[in-house]
Image (cartoon, rainbow, N blue to C red):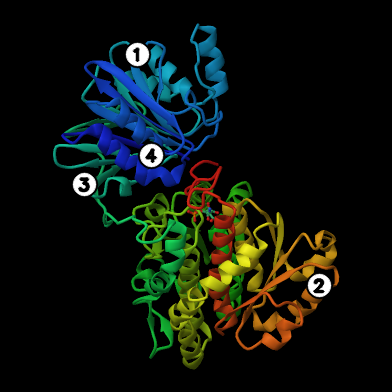
Amino acid sequence: MCGIFGYIGKKDPVKTAIDGLKRLEYRGYDSAGIAGVKDGKILFCKEVGKVAQLEKEVEKQQFSLDIAIAHTRWATHGEPTVPNAHPHVDMMGSLAVVHNGIIENYSEIKEALSAEGVRFSSETDTEVVAHLIAKNYKGDIIAAVQESVKRLKGAYALAIVHRDFPDRIIAVAHESPMVIGVGGQEAFVSSDPNAFAAFTKKVVFLSKSEIAVVEREKLAVYNVELQKISKEETELEISATDISKGHFEHYTLKEIFEQPVTVANAMSGRFSTDLGTALLNGIEDHLPNLGSTSRILILACGTSWHAGYVASYFFEEMAQIPVEVEISSEFRYKNPIVAPNTLVVAISQSGETADTIAAVRELKAKGARLLSICNVQGSTLARESDHTLFLNAGPEVGVCSTKAFTSQIVVLFLLSLFLARRRHMSRDEGKRVLAALTSLPDAIKSILNKSGEIERLAKKYAKFENFFFLGRQYMYPTALEGALKLKEISYINANGYPAGEMKHGPIALISPDCPTVALLGNKKTFDKMLSNLMEVRARKGEVIAITEEGFVKEISKITQDFIEVPQTIDELSPVLSTVVTQLFAYFVAKERGCDIDKPRNLAKSVTVE
Ligand code: M6R
């Protein structure tokens, strides 16, 4: 993971780099650091914790640089300490390096360098790069970087500054993202173009160990054989977005409350009520024969995987297409068989999840067609896909994914409707499901109006250390998602489980100390869920029910702690029930005093395997 930012230009390099890092903090926030050249010397400043800590320190020291590289870290090798924070420098203090990725053969290189007398001051894999470049440096920094990169195995994006070259940053990328922003009399280096989009949208992406020499008004890119190559400049269609919290205490809460709008944005312009179908304009230009898709393979991680899991039910139910949903990190080690007419659907809010990208690269190499569902324009996944359906949800800053999940379901639902209407679904049926879809924003608003009720329940249950989240059919992946939210932001052990499986073992854990969040929003399995909840109650387990309006009589037999959501079709019930579980997790985490927007050990974008 980790975020890299670099700047050369007329602006204050330290301030510009710190501002850039703030936009990259979603990639990790264990420590942060900045280095650069000043009066022919390499200077650096590093702090444990978030970028705000580093900002305070540079202000205190009146730290100043002529050019800067900076880094926000998600620890892989070594704890979050100052010595392990990037940038890393060589023994003579002649150069500094920041890195995103993992150097897989670092121990072998470290051993060899140690035998030659190099002393290491951190436990990181990155430090070997600094010493390796210093060892290979004979006056030509590009040659030294090339020589060093040839020895590296793994994934890396690197930015390097050397005291002998106070006017350039050397950037390298292999399997980790690195983008150079050009134009005007300045240049940027970043893991994500959104970090400098306010200044330029003209970019050059690096890959395959390409080495870029970045100067104020000049960019030269070399392949790993050091042949100069011409790289296409891309004009990105991204805008510099506002990432303020508004009047909300946390980004997570703001993003939960944005959902009436983000869900509306996800569907906007993408359906025709008259025709009872989805309009995914232009999709067939990029994915010809979409209509003859005979198998769908969904790949994703975390919350995006849960959205894919929900969608697998409606692709089969509505479009009657067989679906497989795979966790990318598992799938990539299979030897996939890509049958003809398979549509690969990769889902990723960030578009930077390393496992998903690796899995789809393997599939593309095998000739598969790739459709991605993404939130971030210009992301690696979007650039590598045959076509992308964007969520249009705006930046999701909170590490726990909320609005992206509900938007993903909406977009996947529209895709399913599109395929279903090409096959057997009637116009009237299409109109019926569209009516349910278009009523979601108002339904979400009515749930948000109950946040006080949900907060009261959250306060009552915040003391428990173990939870079950149970559901059936559409409510099973919804239960997984509810449990994930609770564990990641409140650090409570929460198990999402298919309710029918409880009696095959996990019911042994039910006790007065382990409450169950019961997701009853699936009409088809409502009665079966009630029976399972009776079994929980018989073992003195507390139940918090999330149910559709109109079932109070049945629910009251089980619990008085319930939240009602508006009625919808089963396919879309995960959207509404999830808004409740998001608020529940939020208020529990708040009650427990957790760092909600930046939970411990996590990063928003998981860019290492
Ligand atoms: O950016 P992606 O959607 O590919 O990210 C996938 C997961 O890392 C992400 O959903 C993660 O599980 C979130 N922290 C969940 O809230």
Crowdedness of circle 4 by 10 Å Cα count: few (<14), some, many (20+)? some
Q: Secondary structure at mark 4?
A: helix
Q: Dot 1 corresponds to which residue? A: 137
Question: How much space separates mark 2 and mark 4, taking CA atoms?
Answer: 48 Å
Question: How much space separates mark 3 and mark 4, taking CA atoms?
Answer: 22 Å
Disc number for residue 199: 3
Residue 129: x %, y % from top left: 44, 22
Residue 65's place in the image compared with 40, above or below, is below
The answer to which of marks 3 and 4 sits earlier in the sequence is: 4
Q: Nearer the viewer, mark 1 or mark 4?
A: 4
The answer to which of marks 2 and 1 sits earlier in the sequence is: 1
Image-based side of 477 in relation to 56, left or right: right
Q: Nearer the viewer, mark 3 or mark 4?
A: 4
Residue at the spot x=66%, y=69% of the render? 476
Q: Dot 2 corresponds to which residue? A: 537
Amino acid type, callout 3: Phe
Crowdedness of circle 3 by 10 Å Cα count: few (<14), some, many (20+)? some
Q: Dot 4 corresponds to which residue? A: 52
The answer to which of marks 2 and 4 sits earlier in the sequence is: 4
Crowdedness of circle 2 by 10 Å Cα count: few (<14), some, many (20+)? some
Amino acid type, callout 1: Tyr
Residue at the spot x=24%, y=33% of the render? 13
